[in-house]
């Protein structure tokens, strides 16, 4: 008997369309990523024909983010994170501030209120976890010095966005969002609670998780059951990420990243990464499909000029700032170009921030559409940015 199966329909439809169009893109000598995003547009609500579930797709994509960050954490020790803090912390903060100001400048030109400009600018300032890590992996840079700087930078951006998502509702009244404005003491208390929750989660992972997770997996390995080991790895990644969100209001991505870092203490970390790889790849594809589903093609036609300005801020303005910051820290021209290319796109946190802005009355539908379209265009351009960075760096080295 036929019955509705939105979960199965979304997974099957998303993967089948992504496979077909990804293969077509590869045959046309384009990155498969182009095919995945196009698949999302075709199965989205703005095009006729087959439609995937627009609620389930982003949740499935979140699983890809969790597994991807978990895998990265296994190759990124706490020592590595501390080693790049001198450049990652000021660099990420300065870049977020610069991109936010550029976004606010564009919104002021368009006649938007300051509150909308702030949300719009913040959404343009933070890079996509999935796109950045996937690009680093494909280019073999993930475990390089440049890759570690980029990942450390990404972690700082994610932490800033976690704090932003907590504080934005509190500031909504002050920013004309129709909410009751809080006093400065209440805002300070909110910020203190947020930072305390982050600190408590990190302390719990370092003091308890650092011992328990490797010990647990070691006990499973001794049983000789590969299936149980794979299940233990997935349960650790998903369980810690979910617990971090529910108990500490930390993002899924950061929770999974720290789970991976503590698992790196185990001698079975490489095996754990291999076991989670197939699911990680499949759900990462669903992430790109879900991004494509968000795009209304009419935005590309009706707001072309403003969209080009938005993409310019993301791809050129943000990258130029990142390049300049890295050069200020006396890093090589090649390293600076790689970091700049890595950060020349936006993604999942931008979507979350735009959604929150809509719910608080701070962001208009037009602003949200520009953020979504800007994200998709920047993701499509990202492989080209990497190629240009490598070509320009190679040419500069040859001249030297």
Image (cartoon, grey):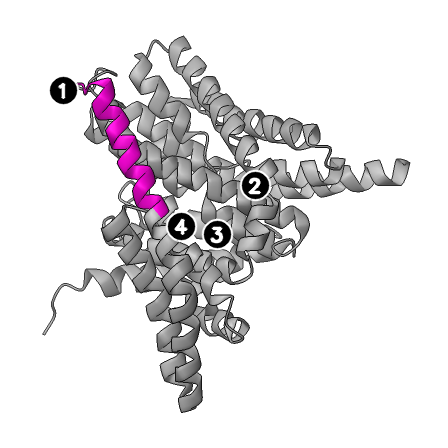
Q: In the visual, does 348 lie left or right of 309?
A: left
Q: Secondary structure at mark 1?
A: loop
Q: Residue 56: say if magenta.
A: no
- Give the distance between the C-alpha atoms of the residues marked 3 and 4, in whole angstroms: 28 Å
Q: Nearer the viewer, residue 4 or 69?
A: 69
Quickly name the residue at label 1: 180
- Above or below, 160 against 248 in this view is above
Residue 304 location (% of width, % of height) = 44, 23
Q: How many marks?
A: 4
- Give the distance between the C-alpha atoms of the residues marked 1 and 3, in whole angstroms: 45 Å
**Category of crowding for the residue at label 1, using alpha-carbon neighbours closer than 10 angstroms: few (below 14), some (14–19), many (at least 20):** few
Residue 81 location (% of width, % of height) = 55, 49
* Between discs 3 and 4, the one toward the N terminus: 3
**Category of crowding for the residue at label 4, using alpha-carbon neighbours closer than 10 angstroms: few (below 14), some (14–19), many (at least 20):** many
Q: In the visual, does 164 lie left or right of 388?
A: left
- Above or below, 107 against 52 in this view is above
Residue 107 location (% of width, % of height) = 39, 15
Look at the image and tell me whether residue 27 can be seen. yes
């Amino acid at each position: 008997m036929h019955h509705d199966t939105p979960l199965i329909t979304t997974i099957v439809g998303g993967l089948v369309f992504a496979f077909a169009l990804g293969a077509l893109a590869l045959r046309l000598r384009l990155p498969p990523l182009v095919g995945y995003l196009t698949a999302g547009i075709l199965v989205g609500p703005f095009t006729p024909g087959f439609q995937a579930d627009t609620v389930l797709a982003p949740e499935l994509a979140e699983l890809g983010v969790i597994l991807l960050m978990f895998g990265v954490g296994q190759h990124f020790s706490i020592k590595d994170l501390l080693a790049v803090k001198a450049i990652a912390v000021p660099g990420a903060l300065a870049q977020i501030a610069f991109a936010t100001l550029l976004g606010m400048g564009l919104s002021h030109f368009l006649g938007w209120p300051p509150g909308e400009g702030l949300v719009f600018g913040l959404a343009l300032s933070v890079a996509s976890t999935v796109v950045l890590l996937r690009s680093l992996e494909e280019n073999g840079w993930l475990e390089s010095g440049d890759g570690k700087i980029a990942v450390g930078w990404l972690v700082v951006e994610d932490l800033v966005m976690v704090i932003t998502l907590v504080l934005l509702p509190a500031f909504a009244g002050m920013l004309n969002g129709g909410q009751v404005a809080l006093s400065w003491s209440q805002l300070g208390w909110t910020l203190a609670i947020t930072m305390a929750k982050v600190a408590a989660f990190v302390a719990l992972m370092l003091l308890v998780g650092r011992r328990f997770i490797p010990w647990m997996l070691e006990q499973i390995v001794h049983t000789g059951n590969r299936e149980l080991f794979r299940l233990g790895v997935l349960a650790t990644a998903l369980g810690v990420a979910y617990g971090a969100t529910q108990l500490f209001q930390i993002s899924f991505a950061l929770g999974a990243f720290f789970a991976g870092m503590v698992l790196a203490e185990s001698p079975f970390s490489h095996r754990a990464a291999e076991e989670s790889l197939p699911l990680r790849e499949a759900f990462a594809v669903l992430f790109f499909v879900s991004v494509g589903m968000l795009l209304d093609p009419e935005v590309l036609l009706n707001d072309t000029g403003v969209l080009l300005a938005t993409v310019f801020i993301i791809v050129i303005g943000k990258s130029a700032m990142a390049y300049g910051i890295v050069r200020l820290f006396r890093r090589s021209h090649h390293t600076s170009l790689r970091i700049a290319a890595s950060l020349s796109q936006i993604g999942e946190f931008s979507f979350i921030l735009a959604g929150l802005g809509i719910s608080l009355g701070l962001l208009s539908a037009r602003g949200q559409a520009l953020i979504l379209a800007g994200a998709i265009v920047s993701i499509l351009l990202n492989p080209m940015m990497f190629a240009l960075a490598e070509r320009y760096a190679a040419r500069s080295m040859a001249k030297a």
